[in-house]
Structure formats: structure tokens, C-alpha cells
Image (spheres, rainbow, N blue to C red):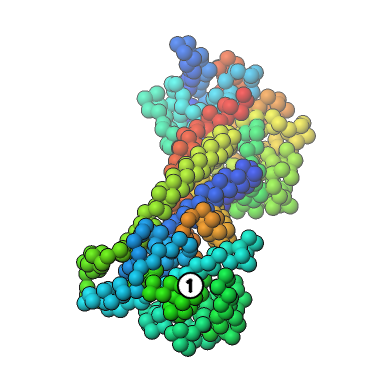
């Protein structure tokens, strides 16, 4: 018999106690995997969202830059407008490769959801927007037939939510204007999936905001210094410049506060799990005091007994770690839903990314916990003298 | 097995326990010799020192004074005490132990319990076939049973099998029938006698059971830490 087989069978003696200890470790491992998975997933999703914007800099009307950025990412009320003439000002800069003007229009729709909701329409320039976002593919149809057409292109999720196909009509509430759906986009995993695109001129006209824009997406030439261009654009009147790299950093900074808190909780969970392991194994050593003495009398050296108890601890931790990783894989969707409810802004796409590398890292951490937790009980067991155990036989 | 005459030679074994500043003598200059293949029983009232003596002879404890030679090899003298690791090395190569409690691991089968010593130590060219050992003890049908499914007598026979698996030179049995009824006690006694007679195993038995003690070639009686009778074996005929 190998020592790990003996150790494993020893753990079967107190199934409930071993089971609860494994569960404690599993919960800690679950927290760890989910936390690291979220860390990675959130950053990836945010990067993807921002990279898929197609532009690096957003010029918006003056106001809170983060609100403006979030508006661009998610849509929402409280819009600020700037004059369309800004476009020419922006284009004057030689570092600017291309631009796309946008007008976000939002309106209350009493028929949306149970108690109504905001319907947002993004007015885009048919000449520049598709080129800026060349990765957008159509599931059905195509872009608008005319820059002033009363037509709409709907994102994948928006089409599912509104249950619209090419040829269907889409009503703009309050305005009593019907748009014809001419295209349904394929899934992109970005905020575009939930957007309803309408020609810029049509939105301006319908919402009576002619000559107004909410944002201009600016793509900077490859070799140009983005920070320098941002500073130049700041000189334009009544606008502010939002670098999406900055937005990403700011959002990540906000998230990192929450992450630190969760890391602290995870650390406490790990410490509790470690104490649980030490307690379980130490109790088991005390209970088997005589038996350990007998094992030594039948030929086990102190190091053999140390190994036996150590291996028991490591088995507990590995089983707990494996179970915890299993939990995190099975329950990652629930974790993600919880995170989405808790955070004010979450990018589209998967927020919790659990990779094989992360699984291995967690197992290594749990193994480390096992190795450290097992030291003291194993040392205590190794010190048991057969004579002491035999003497205690008669007590 | 060493070719010399004596399996065990103890000279002037003294054991004094300390309780605070008080000295409590347990053994007082005990000297004895045991031949190869001899079956010796130790009897005496509780507290007479028989278990203390067998613990020292079995390298489970150090003596306060005296010397011990096992299989012709000096184990300790008055001037040299052994470390726990040294004691373990001697224990596993020379002795097999059985105790009043059987100490079988409850989650291991009979066979797994018997081969448990191999997990830690396997005597080169001497390790026995566990199934043969179990068969010789009448446990061939219990190989895959768990200890909880066995009677007390069967559990003690499993403990004997475990003690024999590494072919010990000397079998130490400390009250092996203390937890058994008279019928099972008799069975265990017969097993020990058979091992001694058929396999030439040297057996040292501590017991309160005089019927069991009579199975031995020689009975050593202890009282107040001293040998009253039986210290020397009968001369070989």
C-alpha cells in the first residue's frame, strides 16, 4: 500500500468532518477562482468594448467626462449637445485619420418593460460610421439606403428584445415616427449588440436637434501622439475630450477598490479554511494518538508518520480545491449575474473568465495552504512516541 | 537470525521514573537471557514491572541503567542511550508487536492492515506473503473484510499477522488476550505456541492469564520490579 492510499482511507473514517473541511476549502477556492476570473474577464471585456469602439478619442459636449463615456458605452438620458461645426474643427488637425459624428437620442417608452423604460437611438453617419466599425457584420440586410432614410439597423440583442427582422417597423415613441428595419447585425459581444442605429440626419430631424451632435468618435493616425492630439482638441470651445484609454483606467481603478475588498474577504476565507484544516487534522492526530504509536512500533519512522499526516492534509486540500474549481465553473454564470447587479457599469461579454492556467494557479495556492496547514499536525504526530501511546492504553 | 545462542541478553536493567523530585523505581537490576526459539511468559501482579520490562526489551523505551544485547548486537549500555529513530530501526528489523488492543485501522481491509508495515518498511528477502500468513492463521476467508466485521479473536489474529509480516526475530505480546473471553484467549495462546514450535519464533508474552502463561517454555515471575523466578533458562538438553 502506498502512503497516500493509507492517508486517503484514514480520511474516510470521519466522513462528515472530512467532508465539511473539504467544503470549507472548496468555498475558499471558489472565491479565489471567481475573483481572479473576474479580474481577468472584466479587463478583457472592457478592453474588447473599448477596442471595438473603432476610435481612440471621443469628443463630447462639456460635462462629466465619465458620464459622457458611460453614455457612449451604454446609452442613457441627460444628454448634452454640441454644434455640428465642431466636426470641421476636429478634421483640421493633421493627426486625425478619420472621424464619425454621432447623436444619441433617448426617449421614454411607456411600453418598454413592466413600467416603461428608456429607448435609445444612435444617429450615425452612414458614410463614416460603417468604415470606422468595419468589424460589424450583418445577420440580415445592410446599412441604410439613404442618409435621410427613416430606416434602422438593429444590434443582435436589440433585435431579439424588440423581436424585429428586416422589413419590420419600429416606432419611435412620442414622435409617432415609424422606422423600417433594414439590417440586423450579427452578435459582436459589445455594446453594439443592444443598439438601434438610425441615420444621423433622421435622428436630428425626428428629435428636432438639427445641427447638433452628442459625440464625435476620432481615430488618430498611427504614428501620432494621442496625448498631444487630445490636448489640441481640448482647445476647441465647449467640448471635452475623453480618451478611452483613460476611461478604461478610471473604470479599472474604480473596480480595483471593490476588488481589494473582495480580496480581503477571500484572504479571510482562506485563513478560516486553513484553520479548519489544521483543526481537523490535529483532532484526528489526537484521536489516533495510540494508533500512531502503534504505526511507529510496526516500523514507521518519525518522517513516515509526518508524511502520512501531511499527505492527509494535502489530499483534503486538493479535493477541496478541485471541488471549488468545479463550483466556480458550474456557477460562473450566477457569479456573473451577481456582479452585473452589483456594479454600476459592466462591459458586455463574459465577465468571469476561468482558464486552465487559473485552475492550476488556484490548485497550486490550495496545495500551498495544505502544505503549510499540515506542518504542525504532522510534526505533532511525528513526535508521538510508541511508549506514550501504549501507556495511555491503560489510562 | 543471528547464529549466537541468545536472542536477548539483558543485564542489570533498572528503570526509575521521575515524578517531580521523587524517584519511583519500576525495575531493579533485572538480568535475564532468552534463547532463540524460546517462548517466555512474564507474569506478576499489576505494577510489578512486567510491561515496563517488555517495553525496554522491545526497544520501546530506554532503561535508566543496564545493558541490552539483541541477536548478538549491543543495543544500549549504561553509557549509551538510543534516539527515537535508532529505536525505530531496531524495532522494525527485530520485533513484531501485539497488544491488548488490536489497533487495526478501521477503514483498511484485513489484507491492507496486514501489509500496512510494508508501507513503511519491508525487510529484505524476509518479507512474508500476506495471504499465506492469513491462511496460516485461519483468516483466508476474511481477507477483504473490514475490522468492524470481525470478532475480537479474529482481530487479534489479524494483529498477529501484521506483526509477522516482516518476519520478526522476536514476537512481543503484551496482554494479547486482555480483551478476549477465555475461549478466544485459548485460541490466541495456541496460535502463539504454534508459531513458536513450528516456525521457531522467539516469543515474549506478558499476561495475567496463568493458563496462557503455562503454554510458555519458561515463566518469569516479577514482583516489585524484581524477578522472583525463572530468570535463567533450563540448560539445553
Q: x and y percent of residue A300 in the render? A: 50, 42
Foreground: A363 or B200? A363
For this orientation, the residue located farthest to the right is: B183
A205 or B124, which lies in front?
A205
Disc 1 crowd, CA 10 A, few/some/many (<14, 14-19, 20+): some
Q: How far across and down, in percent of the image, does residue A392 sit? A: 58, 27
Query: What residue do we see at 30% from left, 63% from top?
Result: A238
Q: Residue at x 35, y 64 (%)?
A: A61
The quadrant the C terminus of chain B occupies is top right
Residue extending furthest toward the top: B22
Residue at figure coordinates x 43%, y 85% from the top left: A147
The residue carrying mark 1 is A207
The percent coordinates of residue A179 (x first, y second) are 55, 80
Please, which residue is most extreme toward the bottom here? A145
Height in image: A255 above or below B194? below
Instruction: Determine the secondary structure under disc 1.
Output: loop
Amino acid at each position: 500500500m502506498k502512503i497516500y492510499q493509507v492517508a486517503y482511507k484514514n480520511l474516510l473514517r470521519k466522513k462528515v468532518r472530512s467532508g465539511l473541511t473539504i467544503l470549507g476549502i472548496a468555498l475558499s477556492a471558489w472565491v479565489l477562482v471567481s475573483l481572479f476570473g473576474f479580474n481577468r474577464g472584466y479587463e478583457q471585456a472592457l478592453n474588447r468594448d473599448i477596442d471595438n469602439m473603432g476610435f481612440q478619442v471621443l469628443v463630447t459636449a462639456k460635462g462629466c467626462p465619465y458620464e459622457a463615456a458611460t453614455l457612449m458605452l451604454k446609452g442613457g438620458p441627460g444628454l448634452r449637445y454640441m454644434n455640428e461645426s465642431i466636426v470641421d474643427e476636429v478634421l483640421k488637425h493633421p493627426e486625425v485619420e478619420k472621424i464619425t459624428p454621432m447623436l444619441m437620442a433617448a426617449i421614454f417608452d411607456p411600453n418598454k418593460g413592466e413600467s416603461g423604460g428608456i429607448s435609445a437611438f444612435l444617429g450615425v453617419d452612414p458614410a463614416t460610421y460603417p468604415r470606422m466599425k468595419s468589424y460589424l457584420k450583418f445577420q440580415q440586410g445592410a446599412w441604410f439606403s439613404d442618409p435621410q432614410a427613416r430606416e434602422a439597423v438593429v444590434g443582435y440583442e436589440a433585435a431579439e428584445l424588440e423581436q424585429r427582422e428586416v422589413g419590420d417597423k419600429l416606432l419611435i415613441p412620442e414622435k409617432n415616427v415609424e422606422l423600417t428595419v433594414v439590417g440586423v447585425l450579427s452578435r459582436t459581444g459589445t455594446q453594439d449588440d443592444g443598439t438601434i442605429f438610425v441615420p444621423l440626419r433622421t435622428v436630428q430631424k425626428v428629435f428636432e436637434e438639427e445641427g447638433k451632435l452628442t459625440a464625435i468618435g476620432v481615430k488618430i493616425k498611427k504614428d501620432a501622439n494621442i496625448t498631444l492630439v487630445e490636448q489640441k482638441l481640448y482647445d476647441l470651445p465647449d467640448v471635452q475630450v475623453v480618451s478611452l484609454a483613460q476611461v478604461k483606467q478610471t473604470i479599472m481603478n474604480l473596480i480595483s477598490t471593490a476588488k481589494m475588498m473582495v480580496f480581503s474577504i477571500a484572504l479571510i476565507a482562506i485563513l478560516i479554511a486553513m484553520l479548519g484544516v489544521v483543526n481537523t487534522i490535529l483532532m484526528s492526530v489526537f484521536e489516533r494518538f495510540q494508533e500512531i504509536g502503534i504505526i511507529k512500533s510496526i516500523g514507521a519512522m518519525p518522517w513516515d508518520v509526518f508524511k502520512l499526516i501531511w499527505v492527509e492534509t494535502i489530499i483534503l486540500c486538493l479535493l477541496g480545491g478541485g471541488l471549488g474549481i468545479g463550483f466556480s465553473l458550474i456557477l460562473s454564470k450566477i457569479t456573473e449575474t451577481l456582479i452585473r447587479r452589483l456594479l454600476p457599469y459592466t462591459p458586455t461579454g463574459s465577465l468571469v473568465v476561468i482558464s486552465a492556467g487559473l485552475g492550476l494557479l488556484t490548485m497550486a495556492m490550495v496545495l500551498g495552504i495544505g502544505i503549510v496547514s499540515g506542518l504542525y499536525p504532522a510534526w505533532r504526530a511525528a513526535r508521538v512516541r510508541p511508549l506514550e501511546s501504549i501507556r495511555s492504553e491503560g489510562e | 537470525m543471528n547464529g549466537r545462542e541468545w536472542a536477548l541478553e539483558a543485564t542489570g536493567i533498572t528503570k526509575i521514573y521521575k515524578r517531580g523530585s521523587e524517584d519511583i523505581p519500576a525495575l531493579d537490576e533485572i538480568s535475564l537471557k532468552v534463547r532463540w526459539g524460546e517462548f517466555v511468559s512474564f507474569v506478576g501482579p499489576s505494577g510489578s514491572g512486567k510491561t515496563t520490562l517488555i517495553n525496554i526489551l522491545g526497544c520501546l523505551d530506554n532503561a535508566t541503567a543496564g545493558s541490552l544485547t539483541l541477536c548478538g548486537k549491543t543495543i544500549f549500555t549504561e553509557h549509551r542511550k538510543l534516539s527515537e529513530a535508532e529505536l525505530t530501526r531496531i524495532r522494525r528489523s527485530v520485533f513484531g508487536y501485539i497488544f491488548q488492543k488490536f489497533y487495526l485501522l478501521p477503514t483498511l481491509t484485513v489484507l491492507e492492515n496486514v501489509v500496512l508495515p510494508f508501507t513503511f518498511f519491508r525487510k529484505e528477502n524476509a518479507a512474508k506473503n500476506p495471504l499465506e500468513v492469513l491462511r496460516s492463521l485461519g483468516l483466508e476467508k476474511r481477507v477483504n473484510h473490514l475490522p468492524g466485521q470481525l470478532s475480537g479473536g479474529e482481530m487479534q489474529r489479524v494483529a498477529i499477522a501484521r506483526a509477522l509480516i516482516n518476519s520478526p526475530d522476536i514476537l512481543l505480546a503484551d496482554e494479547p488476550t486482555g480483551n478476549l473471553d477465555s475461549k478466544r484467549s485459548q485460541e490466541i495462546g495456541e496460535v502463539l505456541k504454534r508459531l513458536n514450535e513450528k516456525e521457531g519464533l522467539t516469543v515474549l508474552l506478558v499476561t495475567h492469564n496463568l493458563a496462557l502463561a503455562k503454554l510458555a517454555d519458561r515463566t518469569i515471575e516479577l514482583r516489585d520490579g524484581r524477578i522472583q523466578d525463572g530468570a535463567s533458562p533450563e540448560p539445553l538438553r
